[in-house]
Amino acid sequence: MIEFHLDRGSGVSTYLQLVHQVKQALRLGTLRPGDQLPTAREVVESLAINPNTVLKAYRELERDGLVEGRPGMGTFVLQSVTGSTLVAHTRLRRDLERWVREAREAGLDQEDLRALFTVVLADSHKDSPGKGAKEGAA
């Protein structure tokens, strides 16, 4: 079962943090179809947040077709975000872990890493063949 956490200084709304964490867990394979999400009461008690915030996050996940609420039973995962999980990409994960280690040894902190990764990711999206044409056609 997923255990939610909050970054109150992130500037990202609480309900979106919950949504993003569920989607990330689906991508990583730590949540799979059939798994149950924590009840709203459990999330409220562990994070000290408003129950409506949890319900809003779960409703958005339902609208995305990722989970379904079953009255009296809870909220269950229906499907993953992608066809395959990122767990299947072990070599890439090892390479990324090595890169993070080297960056830390070079003196970069977490915010530096995040900024660098975000810039490289954005640049790689611009340089991907066919990406611009697909988006322009939509």
Image: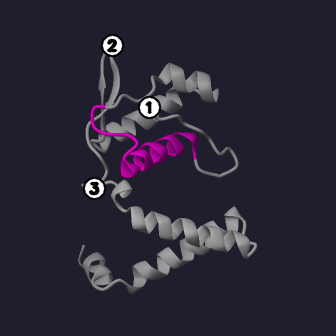
What residue sits 36% from the left and 28% below the top? 36
Looking at this view, is 129 or 29 the one in front?
29
Magenta segment boundaries in residue numbering: 13-34
Q: CA distance from mark 2 to mark 3?
A: 31 Å
What residue sits 73% from the left and 76% below the top? 106
Mark 1 neighbour density, 10 Å: few (under 14) some (14–19) many (20 or more): few
What residue sits 32% from the left and 82% below the top? 132
Rendered location of residue 130, percent (x, y): 27, 83
Question: Which secondary structure is most common in the magenta stretch?
Answer: helix
Identify whether 92 is placed above or below 85: below
Q: Residue furthest top?
A: 72
Rendered location of residue 90, percent (x, y): 40, 61
Q: Circle 2 sits on which residue?
A: 72
Q: Earlier in the sequence, mark 2 or mark 3?
A: 2
- In which quadrant is the N terminus drawn? top left
Q: Circle 3 sits on which residue?
A: 84
Picture quadrant of residue 137: bottom left
Identify whether 90 is placed above or below 32: below
| Secondary element at tag 3 | loop
Q: Circle 1 sits on which residue?
A: 1
Mark 3 neighbour density, 10 Å: few (under 14) some (14–19) many (20 or more): few
